[in-house]
Amino acid sequence: MRLAVVFYYTSHTPMLFRTLLLSLVTTSLGAAEVPTRKILFFTKSSGYEHEVISWAKGQPSFAEKELLVLGMENNWEFTFSKDGSKFSPEYLAQFDALLFYTTGDLCDLGRDKNPPMTLAGKQAIFDFVRGGKGFIGTHSTSDTFHTDNESQKGPERYVNHCEKADPFVKFLGAEFIIHGKQQVAKNTVIDPTFPGFEKVGESFSFQEEWYSLKDYNSDIHALTLIDAPAMDGTMYQRPPYPNCWARNEGKGRIFYTAMGHREDVWTNPIYRQILVGGIKFALGDAKGDTTPNLTKVAPGASVNPKYVAPKAAAAVAPTTK
């Protein structure tokens, strides 16, 4: 099958969403046509906006450019948006999966000033997946809809809330606490049969901004464990914990990877294999085991790092003339 690509870029006012559409025109070469899958890549940042998904100077983000390539290779049609106000059952019905790279309370206007979603729009995400569709979370998706707005707090961020966690945290499978300096870390592959992990090997390591996570759902199927004890930083002084996993939500499928901060991670063959496999799983186009395995493979995952109070700023001596 040969793919011809038509790219559309629509620019509205700076404070409103911009939409990037990829239309894939397929020409059959005798093989059966693979149906085009439609995916919404949603990147509103009510909290910190990562450079890799920023629309700087009115241009597509780095991540979006990479997804266009993956779309051509896999017959995926992406819609790129930062407009939360569009979320409704009717709007989401056109998509086969949602791919998130977000931060903060998406029901709040937040830092990027793009339109927020309503609580009904948030519920529409859950209903969309429970009805049989897919959800893929990348990197800071776990830094979204914090329980009790804990992203703005101190010691409370290090507490597991379990059943009292925010519905989005339970939906995704865990919640971001904090990260340390970017560094090379070892990740052990738990399920090499899962889509995207078949050729990764027993483990992989590269430079990244690695998340320390908490409040793991007991029903997740862990795919990788990060070797936290060997890492530099108090936030990693804990037993190994998952940073890629899959789970079922109703009739639908959820995949999450904590990777994706750096541009060179988005071009890394290992990350691309994992991301493509996770998307295929979420779409239902590739089968993956979702048997809960957290307590078996990561019995210490619920042991969070200790809170370390930030150092007080040094007093600045007054200047004299």
Image: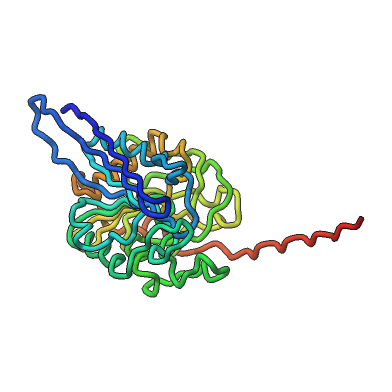
State the residue at coordinates (34%, 64%). 117
- As drawn, the residue found furthest toward the front would be 13
41 left or right of 28 in image:
right
In front of the other: 97 or 247: 97
Is residue 6 at all visible to an observer of this figure? Answer: yes
Q: Position of residue 24 (x, y in %)?
A: 20, 35
Task: Count up the numbered dots.
Answer: 0
State the residue at coordinates (26%, 64%). 126
Q: Position of residue 306 (x, y in %)?
A: 58, 64
In which quarter of the view is residue 118 placed? bottom left
Whether residue 54 is situated above or below residue 267 in the rendered picture = below
Q: Position of residue 69 (x, y in %)?
A: 31, 34
Is residue 295 at all visible to an observer of this figure? Answer: no
Whether residue 86 is situated above or below residue 163 in the rendered picture = above
15 left or right of 183 in image:
left
- As drawn, the residue found furthest toward the top would be 29
In front of the other: 203 or 316: 316
Q: Position of residue 46 (x, y in %)?
A: 44, 60
Q: Quadrant of the C terminus?
A: bottom right
